[in-house]
Image: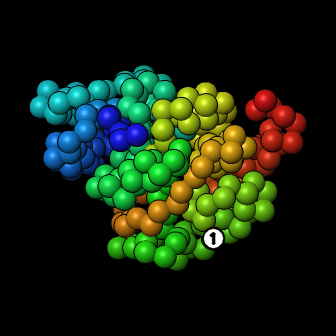
Amino acid sequence: MPMKKLSVIIPAYNEEHRIGKTLSAVSAFLQKQTYSTEILVVNDGSKDKTAQIVSEYAKKIPNLILVDNQENHGKGWVTKQGMLKAVGDVRLFMDADNSTVVDEVAKMLPYFEQGYSIVVGSRRIAGSEIAVKQPWIRDFLGGVFRLIVHTLVPVGVTDSQCGFKAFTQGATEKIFSQQTIYRWAFDVEILALARRAKFKIKEVPVKWVNDSESHVKFSGMVKMLFEVIQIRLNLWTGKYK
């Protein structure tokens, strides 16, 4: 069945310097499409002017909605909130830094018509393009993390951490209602839940640009590891049933 409405969910925390440019790019692409659209920016208790800037853009961008949380809960928490609040029959979440531009969703949409419930962007498969690479240490740590993830919680894709993933309405409601991890490893959990529910998943190559302002510290990697272990325990103990 052809898609009728696309929802684009953008979790945002202290993004005052980048969110305006991202919203302009997303809006420019969506306004050219034949299907209905909406954009939800979910503010994660930002301490800067992110919410105010989004509010100003909402005056000139049709169907732009600000979900304004006063407290910080984590990227996974606000992504869940936005995905479940959205009304599109396909729902895409993407990063506020625009590291993968919304135009890449055009590669994804045909797979939903082929019966896939989830389509995820990947920087690790043939056809992908990393226009600006991240520092070697982050790339190395990312490789170590991927090895750990694939060992502890096989998720069926090569790149669990690319923040560009699209879900049908049905997959969204099933998976995100069960989500319990809200910070570092939430992508791993939602993919593990999708695999457990036997949803049909497609991985597609995307173009990705590293943003020099984006940083993941070693302490973040350690926290991520503990969350992956928690997901493994949740699967073992039947917490998701």
Please say whether residue 227 is visible from this viewpoint. Answer: no
Q: Residue at x 52, y 72 (%)?
A: 125
Residue at 20% x, 42% y: name it: 34
Q: Which quadrant would residue 153 be assigned to in this image?
A: bottom right
Q: Nearer the viewer, residue 202 or 92?
A: 202
What's under tag 1, amino acid-wise? Gly
**Number of other residues with Cα within 10 Å of mark 1, as a class: few under 14, some 14 to 19, many 20 or more:** few
Q: Position of residue 227 (x, y in %)?
A: 71, 45
- The x and y percentages for residue 195 are 68, 48
Quarter of the figure with the C terminus: top right
Pinpoint residue 58: horizontal percent, then vertical percent: 19, 29
Direction from residue 74 to residue 88 in the image, left or right: left
Q: Is residue 230 left or right of residue 18?
A: right
Displayed quadrant of residue 63: top left
**Between 180 and 107, which is closer to the camera in this rendering?**
107
Identify the element where label 1 is drawn.
Answer: helix
Determine if residue 157 is in view: yes
Give the residue at the far right of this rendering.
Answer: 237
Return the residue at label 1: 143
